[in-house]
Image: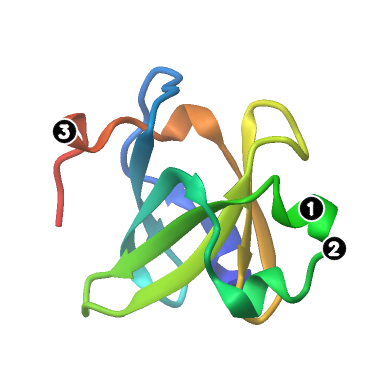
Amino acid sequence: MKTLLAFVALLVSLPAHGATMSAEFETMGFGALKMTLFDTPCDRGLILAQMTKEWQKKFQRAEARLTDGTVLKLCWSGEARPGYAFVVDETGETGTLPLELFMPPHRNQGF
C-alpha cells in the first residue's frame, strides 16, 4: 500500500459524488491500477477488526484492480478529511486520495 501513495494520476476529473466512483492510476511498484470506491458499508473483516466500532460505521467498501487481475480489498472513508478518500488495506496500511480524481465508472474508461 505504501507504493500506492506515489500516484501519478492518469485521469483527472471534476469532483464527483455518487454511489460508485473510480479512478485509474499509474503507481510505482504495481504499475497501472483502477481503484473503485463503493457507497456500501465496508465488509472487509480483516480491515474492520483493526478499527473501533465507531470508526467501522464510517467506512465504505473499496477495491483496487491491478492490470494483472489482482484485486486489493480496501475500505475508505470521506469523513477523516473532507474532500479526500482515506483508504485502508488489509495490512493496516493507509493512503489519502483527493476525491476529485474519482468519477462514476461509466465516464472512466479503462481496464
What SS does tag 1 mark?
helix
Going by the numbered disc 2, the residue's amino acid type is Thr
The image quadrant of residue 15 is top left
Going by the numbered disc 1, the residue's amino acid type is Trp
Residue 67 point in image, percent of width and height: 22, 71
Vertically, is 68 above or below 40? below
Q: Reading the chain from its start, which is encountered first: label 2 or label 3?
A: 2
Circle 1: is it few (<14), some (14-19), or many (20+) Cα within 10 Å? Answer: few
Residue at x-position 14% and y-position 57% = 111
The label on residue 44 is none
Residue at x-position 42% and y-position 46% = 38
Q: CA distance from mark 2 to mark 1?
A: 5 Å
Decide if residue 64 is on the left or right side of residue 41: left
Going by the numbered disc 3, the residue's amino acid type is His
Q: Reading the chain from its start, which is encountered first: label 3 or label 1?
A: 1
Residue at x-position 45% and y-position 23% = 17
Residue 64 point in image, percent of width and height: 39, 63
Give 18 or 24, whichever is nearer the viewer.
18
What SS does tag 3 mark?
helix
Circle 3: is it few (<14), some (14-19), or many (20+) Cα within 10 Å? Answer: few
Q: Which residue is mark 1?
A: 55
- Mark closer to the observer (3, 1): 1
Q: Which residue is mark 2?
A: 52
